[in-house]
Amino acid sequence: MTDVRLLTGGEAVAHAMRQIDPDVVPVYPITPQTPIIQTFAKLIADGEASTEIVNVESEHSAMSAAIGAALAGGRTMTATSSQGLALMAEVVYIAASMRAPIVMALGNRALSGPINIHCDHSDSMLIRDSGVVQLFAESAQDAYDLTVMAPRIAEDARVLLPVLVCLDGFTITHSAEPVSLLPDDEVARFVGPYRLRNAVLDTTRPTTQGPFAMPDYYFELRRQQAAALEAALDVLEEVAAEFELLSRRRVGALEAYRLEDATRAIVALGSTAGTVKDVVDELRDEHEAAGLLRLVSFRPFPSAAIAAALEGCASVAVLDRADSPGGTPPLHAELAAALYGSDLELAGHVYGLGGRELHPPDVREIFRGAAAPYVGLRGERCPV
Amino acid sequence: MDGMTEIRWHARAGQGAKTAAQILALALLRTGKGVQAFPEYGPERRGAPLRAYTRVADRPIRRHDSVTDPDVVVVLEPSLVHEAGVAEGLAPDGYVVFNGDEAPPELDEVVVRCVPAQRLASKLGSGFVNMVMLGAVAAELGEPPLADLQDAAVETLGRKVAADDVRRALSEGYAWLN
């Protein structure tokens, strides 16, 4: 019998954590991540998980402790948002370079300033090049599914990198939706035991961790790390296929929604994809050949699969929920590179910064090619 | 609205609108509906005006934007009609469920169903104004059945409250508009 509950995205991630039952969770609270760790801490207090929570004094320390725990030989998870990730950023790069398979939930929230608590993807994009896997959830169900899948991807010997499960702040973290939970024992079997080949505390096989690397080795180590992130694409699909056998739900690197004969498509990350799907259905009812390409994996970026999925389209609008002042917004830039040489028309739109809403009529405007580059921005141009 | 009903709850933070919105969603989920429940977050402080939402449809709900044109508006806190634009965006065939004996002049232009929830809750002695209103909303919607709503409420509110008080408050509100 399936266990369908009404859960917020934050609670759904906490339940995935309960079922994974990691050894260590070092964490520091921040809105809108807090419900994840608050719910998880309650589940531990109720005796439903045996994880050791380490209360640390900052996110910098949270990630530092996570590296120590993961490399010592314990399965390790954490969670953060926005400024927390910004403070943590230095150590996120180190976690990736030390190949620490930490799983972290990121409740996406706009970076300050001005200070804001609502969703955009500027925090994710801040650590775009840190070498971590970044997977974006569309719904609370997706956030649960990706969290269950994440340790398998992170800990695969071909990867050994941190995996971030990104869920839109408030829109997903705090919205209650139906979530189907897998049985506890099935998740435990799926995730399996944590086995790190080069654990620090394995005294029978002493290793050096986090060494100094001068011009003679730094370049090679960085290249190995990048290759591992590229390999995560295949691993993600393998894990997704195995997860589908359990759940009958498939969450791979991307989702092509009614794209097969679409001439116009939108490319988007996160919860907005759900709103776009509704508009695609409306347009299809009106005999418009519209489709959606929902990107789940932003890092690694599935360029070849994207190019193949969009092959028949005449025009594509890419929605960035982060800006790149003075340059091209991140998703737009990636799409332009992935589609280089194709003759389809690519339009970039920035939307939703700091939690600005995107409603179905906005999405229709984008499909019509009538939307401004900054969707939902008030006034024709901002005073400087 | 294309088979989807959208409900907007107005209250002050601490009055239980977010909880009521979730309980309604949970009970409707159990009857096989697609549901979504979420609060609108501003500065978090007790007493601040707060909006919460419930969406319900015959299919899974995928959209993730806020509710702009509610079919039903629930006013848990009567004083908010002076400040919160409670009838804003109300669908043409929509209505307001108002906590009070009679509709205030601010709501002259819209259909209002009055439920003296404050008085009913005081009479019951338990003070569950939000549960009285929730019962009334379910009666007006025609779903979910009262017993399902009561079960969902008791389950959500847990051991911290007396289950019988919760059930009574819901049935009092339900009876008022049924």
Image (cartoon, grey):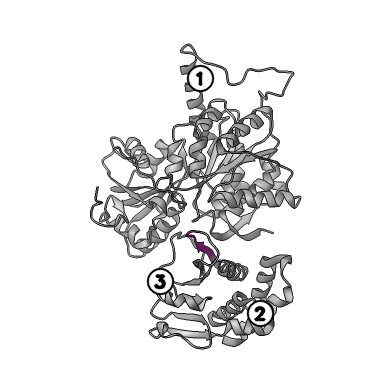
Image coordinates of residue A355 in percent, x first then y, are: 42, 54
Q: CA distance from mark 1 to mark 3?
A: 55 Å
Protein chain holding label 2: B
User: In the drawing, does residue A60 fall left or right of residue A313?
Assistant: right
Residue numbers of the magenta segment: B36-43
Protein chain holding label 3: B
Image coordinates of residue B144 in percent, x first then y, are: 60, 76
Is A19 magenta? The answer is no
User: In the drawing, does residue A139 fall left or right of residue A383?
Assistant: right
At x 36% / y 44%, what residue is drawn?
A310
* Quadrant in which residue A332 is drawn: top left
Protein chain holding label 1: A
Q: Which residue is disc 3 drawn over?
A: B69
Predominant SS along the magenta part: strand
Q: Is residue B93 above or below residue B158?
A: below
At x 37% / y 39%, what residue is drawn?
A330
Q: Which residue is disc 1 drawn over?
A: A221
Residue flagged by tag 1: what amino acid is it?
Leu
Q: Which mark is residue B169?
A: 2
Which tag is nearer the camera, tag 1 or tag 2?
Answer: 2
Figure quadrant of the N terminus of chain A:
bottom right
